[in-house]
Image (tube, rainbow, N blue to C red):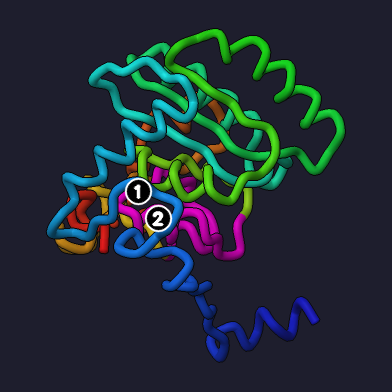
């Protein structure tokens, strides 16, 4: 089938994932402290303080970087780990909610949890908690999605719905839905996040520089 699909590729188009807007709606979400939309985006900071209280994070003027999702090879676990240390080294706070599908990965992140959770700027929660997931999307400033491959993905779409800026790798549906703030050929009002290309530490610490590979609503206009 591979050759046939290649020959006829011009006949096919992808269909992006969609959200349940009743479940993922910052204007009505029962799991967050303050409801908001793009006109009342300042209320997002009430949820940021609620997230800090929930996870015992230090209350300081710092961005909160988050990861929500599975911890497996597809999701770029080495880059998720890198994001935690990079965030803390560069004056941000980092929170994670997820569990590993592979025993070794889960064990590694449990070890990392014991290593980092004494830091007042970091909290790793191994497992899944629906209420906490909603609060993280509402309270975080940025969400990292450094997938090795991703047919479409929902994390970045939920983040945009909650006015939380996605930082994604330029693969699959991620690059189809997130358009880089600086390098996208899209008009500024359609740019909505940050995109990087290479699945290594150096690549995830610098942004996408190939406009043809990066596509972004401005962060301040991504809620609601």
Name the quarter where the N terminus is drawn.
Answer: bottom right
Q: Residues within 10 Å of mark 2 (few under 14, many from 20)?
A: some
Location of residue 110 by image quarter: top right
Q: Is residue 154 left or right of residue 112?
A: left
Residue at image location 44% in from the left, 63% down from the top: 24
Residue extending furthest toward the right: 103
Measured as percent of width and height from the top left, residue 30 is found at 43, 58
Q: How crowded is mark 1: few (under 14 residues within 10 Å), some or many (20 or more)?
A: some
Location of residue 21 by image quarter: bottom left
Q: In this view, does 183 lie to the left or right of 123?
A: left
Q: Nearer the viewer, residue 87 or 211?
A: 87
Answer above or below: position of 94 versus 116.
below
Q: Mark 2 falls on what kind of element? A: loop
Q: In this view, does 78 lie to the left or right of 162?
A: right
Residue at image location 67% in from the left, 17% down from the top: 112
Measured as percent of width and height from the top left, residue 128 is found at 66, 44
Q: Which of 61 and 59 is in front in this view?
A: 59
Q: Mark 2 points at which residue?
A: 213
Measured as percent of width and height from the top left, residue 209 is found at 33, 42
Circles 2 and 1, Cβ within 8 Å, touching? The answer is yes
Q: Name the residue under label 1.
A: 210
Name the quarter where the C terminus is drawn.
Answer: bottom left
Residue 215 in sight here: no
Q: Nearer the viewer, residue 23 or 16?
A: 23
The stretch drawn in magenta includes residue 165? yes
Answer above or below: position of 171 versus 107.
below
Measured as percent of width and height from the top left, residue 141 is found at 32, 38
The stretch drawn in magenta includes residue 130? no
Residue 142 in sight here: yes
Span of residues in magenta:
150-176
Q: Mark 1 falls on what kind of element? A: loop
Res. 2 mark: none
């Amino acid at each position: 089938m591979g050759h046939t699909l290649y020959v006829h590729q011009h006949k096919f188009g992808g269909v992006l994932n969609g959200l349940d807007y009743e479940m993922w709606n910052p204007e009505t979400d029962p799991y967050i402290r303050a409801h908001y939309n793009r006109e009342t985006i300042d209320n997002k900071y009430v949820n940021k303080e609620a997230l800090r209280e929930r996870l015992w994070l230090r209350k300081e003027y710092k961005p909160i970087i988050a990861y929500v999702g599975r911890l497996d090879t597809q999701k770029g676990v080495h880059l998720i780990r890198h994001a935690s240390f990079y965030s803390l080294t560069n004056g941000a706070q980092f929170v994670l909610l997820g569990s590993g599908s592979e025993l070794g990965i889960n064990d590694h992140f449990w070890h990392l949890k014991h290593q980092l959770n004494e830091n007042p700027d970091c909290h790793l929660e191994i497992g899944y908690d629906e209420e906490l997931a909603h609060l993280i999307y509402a309270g975080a400033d940025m969400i990292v999605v450094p997938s090795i491959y991703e047919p479409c993905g929902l994390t970045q779409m939920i983040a945009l719905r909650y006015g939380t800026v996605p930082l994604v790798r330029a693969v699959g549906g991620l690059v189809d839905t997130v358009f880089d703030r600086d390098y996208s050929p899209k008009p500024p009002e359609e740019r909505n996040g940050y995109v990087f290309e290479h699945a290594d530490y150096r690549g995830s610490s610098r942004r996408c520089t190939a406009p043809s590979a990066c596509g972004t609503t401005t962060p301040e206009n991504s809620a609601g």
